[in-house]
Image (cartoon, coloured by chain):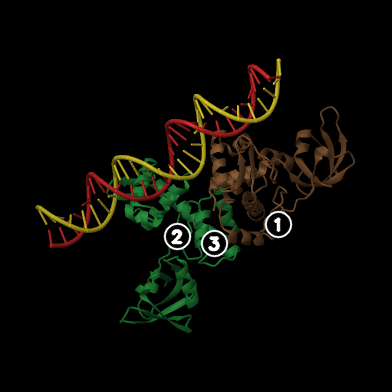
Chain colours: A green, B brown, C red, D yellow
DNA sequence: AATAAAATTTAGATTGGCCTAAATTTATTA
DNA sequence: TAATAAATTTAGGCCAATCTAAATTTTATT
């Protein structure tokens, strides 16, 4: 289908446009693909020739319908493989990203659909990100950052917006894993940090930076 | 580690040298890698520079210890993935080769060792080929081609030396799958075809060509 | 042993993906 | 709004992997 590299660009554009068709910049793409802006420009021309993106010189890019479909399919594969790695092979949630990054490029619809069934058609990956179904539809849950919650509000941790291993390990250590019930008890005015209760039993104080990356279902 | 392409060359050399260190020809490699001899020559130089093969111009190549190790590791991955596809995802034995061909290049020792455990450390893949253990040791069973059996001899079908989908589907149709007990009842002198009984119940006549590609444990 | 055939290698080019340095366009700010 | 800064693109090159056509070496055959 598309080359390994093309797929990575499509995925990058998808992520930068927040899963939609927002305009994305050359430098933004360069940053998350670990390449230089000049290389990105080259590739954008190729992707535009293939009608996967709309590209206007100096103005940025958006995904076409075809491009979006392709990107969503890669996301689907990535997330299903992550579920497999955690649920079946016993990896931790902070260990699976790099491996899934490779597996997502395996090209077989039969494989991915069977894998989906084997896993019981999961709705979300180990980080709470929704898994597109085989027709490419994504069920977006309305989640709220802890940093946007008011004192007294409660909810269940249902996602994270930062996937680095250091961050995920920290959450684990703090007991802030998916499914945990939290209540915001206090906002610390001085530095914006936030006090929480976990499952009505433990207390935690987390920095604003951490709070921004934890998503809660109210 | 090594590039996708390098891995495919190593695998090709491995197969052509019968899993050993026999001398392999440029044309032979070109044939199974679907490239031209000139391309092979280029790559052989690179592999020789990296000490993965011993290469003497015009004389052919052999794998070095390092090269053999790398090749065996790819074989291990390929065969474990095949087991996964058949045992866990429900693919048929004639459907898994191409997918495993892609999966074998995924680069993670942790992944493959966990997969091995998840599958119960299988000794052979769905075609009966032995799976190297994590240290690279392969347990070779002494198997005999049906075409080399004498009338009256019995054994259990334990492998095939041809992996094409047409061949495997034929075996399925004939009931000549792994584990089937067969007895050679007669050799037909005219065309070399062979009469068998299956599990002491059914009769089958197979061509010499088919018989050559079925391996039996006596 | 000489010659023809087959196998292999070299020469020279192409394509995909990437780079640096220089040029151009857009955005910012004095 | 003119000048400066930032973002982006172009120009020109590099490397991996491939190819065709021509040259060379080995093998097979008179």
Q: Quadrant of residue A90?
A: bottom right
Where in the figure is residue B161, as x and y percent of width and height? 72, 42
SS of the residue at dot 1?
loop
**Do marks 1 and 3 share a subunit?**
no
For the residues bearing labels 1 and 2, Cβ distance under 8 angstroms: no
Q: Is residue B166 left or right of residue A23?
A: right
Q: Return the chain for callout 3.
A: A
Q: In the rendered view, would you say A76 is above or below B29? A: below
Q: Return the chain for callout 1.
A: B
**Do marks 2 and 3 share a subunit?**
yes
SS of the residue at dot 3?
helix
Where in the figure is residue A97, as x and y percent of width and height? 49, 61
Instruction: Please state, as top left, top right, bottom left or bottom right, where the C terminus of chain A lies in the image.
Output: bottom left
Judge by depth and name the residue closer to the eye, C11 or B194: C11
Q: Real-space Cα distance between discs 2 and 3?
A: 17 Å
Where in the figure is residue A186, as x and y percent of width and height? 36, 82
Along the polypeptide, which appears first: circle 2 or circle 3?
3
Q: Mark 1 or mark 3, which is nearer to you?
A: 1
Where in the figure is residue A47, as x and y percent of width and height? 38, 44
Q: Is residue A24 visible?
A: no
| Residue marked by disc 1 | B122
Residue in the image at 54% along x and 62% along y: A83
Residue in the image at 56% along x and 53% along y: B106
Q: Is residue A125 visible?
A: yes
| Residue marked by disc 3 | A83
| Residue marked by disc 2 | A139
SS of the residue at dot 2?
loop
């Amino acid at each position: 289908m598309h080359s390994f590299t093309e797929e990575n660009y499509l995925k990058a554009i998808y992520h930068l446009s927040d899963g939609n068709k927002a305009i994305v910049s050359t430098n933004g793409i360069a940053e998350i693909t670990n390449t230089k802006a000049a290389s990105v420009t080259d590739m954008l021309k190729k992707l535009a020739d293939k009608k996967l993106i709309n590209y206007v010189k100096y103005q940025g890019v958006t995904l076409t319908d075809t491009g979006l479909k392709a990107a969503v399919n890669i996301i689907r594969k990535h997330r299903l493989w992550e579920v497999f790695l955690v649920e079946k092979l016993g990896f931790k949630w902070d260990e699976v990203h790099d491996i899934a990054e490779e597996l997502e490029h395996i090209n077989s619809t039969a494989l991915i659909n069977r894998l989906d069934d084997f896993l019981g058609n999961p709705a979300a990956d180990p980080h709470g990100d929704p898994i597109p179904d085989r027709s490419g539809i994504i069920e977006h849950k309305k989640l709220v950052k802890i940093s946007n919650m008011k004192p007294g509000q409660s909810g269940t941790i249902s996602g994270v917006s930062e996937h680095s291993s250091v961050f995920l390990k920290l959450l684990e250590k703090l007991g802030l894993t998916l499914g945990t019930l939290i209540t915001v008890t206090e906002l610390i005015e001085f530095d914006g940090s936030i006090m929480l209760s976990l499952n009505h039993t433990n207390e935690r104080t987390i920095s604003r930076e951490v709070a921004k990356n934890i998503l809660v279902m109210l």
